[in-house]
Amino acid sequence: MTTTPPTPAKHLPIRLESHFGDRVVRCFHPRPADLNAMWRPHARRHPTKEAVVSGDERLNWGQLEDRALRAANGLRSLGVGKGDRVALLMGNHSQFIVAFFAAQALGAVIVPLSTRDQTPGLTYILAHSGAKVLISDPDLQERWPLPADVPELRHRLLAGVPATHPQAFAALQSHAPLPELEPVVEEDLALIMYTSGTTGFPKGAMLTHLNVVHSVMHYQQALGLDENVRGAVVVPLSHVTGLVAIMLVALGLGGTLIVAAAFKAPDFLRLAARERMSYTILVPAMISLCLLQDDFAQHDLSAWTACGYGGAPMPPATIDRLGQQLPGLRLSNCYGATETTSPTTVMPAALTRDHLDSVGLPLPCAEVAVMDDEGRELPRGEIGELWLKGPMVVKGYWNNPQATAENIIGGHWRSGDVGRMDEHGFVYVMDRRKDMLNRGGYKIFSVEVENTLCQHADVLEAAVVAKPCPVLGERVHVFVHPREGRQIDTAALRAFCAERLSDYKVPESFTVSAAPLPRNANGKLLKRDMREQLLRELAATA
């Protein structure tokens, strides 16, 4: 087993800088001054190069720039200026991209909204962010909040309708291109991305130009990407992975963005082959679904050279089969969050197979500290909360100084993840604090049990949740979904775990699901839904 990381590729120059008042962080230097300085030069240098492929639509860089600057001038005619918030309630298509760059050209702030959110959640975010404009897909109009509930929302525009429609976003492109971009500085906001809000109201993470530029450069270096990248986005553009890690990486480097409306394994494989996709980020379940397609080997995926993954354990059998099918593919575990503008650690592709339980090494400008409950750093190997620092950590939370003070301390963001770092610098995420089980005083990290179960030949995916117990507090319960054509024998699974785990970690009960386990639009398991299902089942049998 490889334990020592290889000599890294030559790093981009780095220096210490002061940002956001009291933070001193490592920063790339030189670097683009802002997002506009990152994307627009590509349109000037190679205007006929393909920039966006979305369904039947293809835009070259000159067309993307023209549409974005015309839309920017149209937004300015509606009163949108620097610092104003523009909300996007749209699925994955070209008008999302045009609207994003149009707002950036004005120095405005994009507020992405999930197309899965309902009226109460949309109302809260639109009101809290003080959005001036909402650009929405037509089929989501029924979820729009009442005007009285969002008094600062002045304009509601529709994407995907004819320019003759009175609310058409496309009508903005009848304006002349914006003659000059609004100057911004790198600590200005580019985005406000609202967290999931699993406890209380969602918080608006403030992503600056500095944050996003560093994330693009981190992915560029860690995954070996350049201006030839053809990145495919199959997760929502409203999520930090789709927006920053794929869209802005591909277009920020001057490459091509391939847009899929949603992930369906057969469609994705056809799209990736036809468009010569070279890069994407998926969750392990998506990769497994691709490999389950009978015609996988018939698709020419030889251009696919870089793939990030995260959010769940990657079964070794999946990695091995992917390596056999695509020997030229570099597969890297990537760990981050909205508050870190996506990446904090990345596993070098050459070490992925030998370090399945690690999320990789800290990126060049990133710092990872393992802290105890009193805010003291723990020695290597000990388990605590992961605190993350760097120029990619957000400025704070919009209109929420209390949350900013509680979650960002001395430039470190308290992730809420329980983990450790080994003597070689590899980072391990053991669990979310809320997902960690306590069985009679023994702490159980659900990811360890899930990793073990995913090594079983019959298991496609597994999720561990706590089953309430009046004696021990919590016991280990597992939701498990079998591989196609396989049957789950829970006694065999329990014995399999007993051979590999401490006795108190062995699952005591199972829910076998014929359907895939519930996930959000980004492919992450919805453990809250599974906990609620388990509690309903227990109440029904009480």
Image: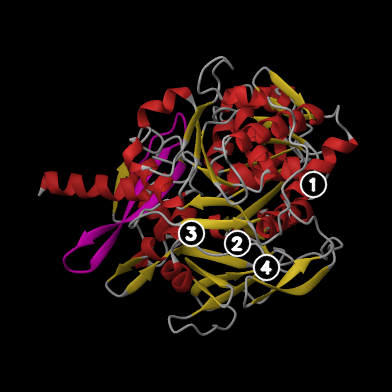
Tell me which segment is drawn in magenta. 460-489
Q: Is residue 486 within the magenta segment? A: yes
Q: Position of residue 444 (x, y in %)?
A: 38, 66
Quote the CA–CA distance across marks 3 and 2. 32 Å
- Mark 2–mark 1 contact, CB under 8 Å? no
Residue 366 tag number:
4
Q: Tag 2: Cα neighbours inside 10 Å, few (<14), some, or many (≥20)? A: many
**Label 4 crowd bin: few (<14), some (14–19), many (20+), radius 10 Å:** many
Left or right side of 180 for 488: left
Query: In the image, which is nearer the foreground, mark 3 or mark 2?
Result: 3
Name the quadrant containing residue 413: bottom right
Pointer 3 residue: 398
Please determine whether, in this image, residue 541 is positioned above or below residue 348: above
What is the CA distance from the residue labelled 4 to the residue labelled 2? 16 Å
Disc 1 to disc 3, C-alpha distance: 32 Å
State the image quarter where residue 501 is shown.
bottom left
Label 1 Cα neighbours within 10 Å, binned few <14 / some 14-19 / many ≥20: many
Q: Do residues under tags 1 and 3 come within 8 Å of each other at their CB atoms?
A: no
Which residue is painted at 60% across and 42% down in the image? 242
Instruction: Between label 1 and label 3, give the one nearer the viewer.
Output: 3
Residue situated in front as seen by the camera: 239 or 474: 239
Q: Residue at x 45, y 63 (%)?
A: 431
First of labels 4, 2 by sequence position: 2
Find the distance from the CA under tag 2 to the CA under tag 1. 22 Å
Q: In the image, what residue occupies the spot 70% across and 43% down?
A: 105
**Tag 3's secondary structure?**
loop
Which numbered circle lies on residue 225?
1
Looking at the magenta stretch, what is its main secondary structure?
strand
Q: Amino acid at mark 4?
A: Ala
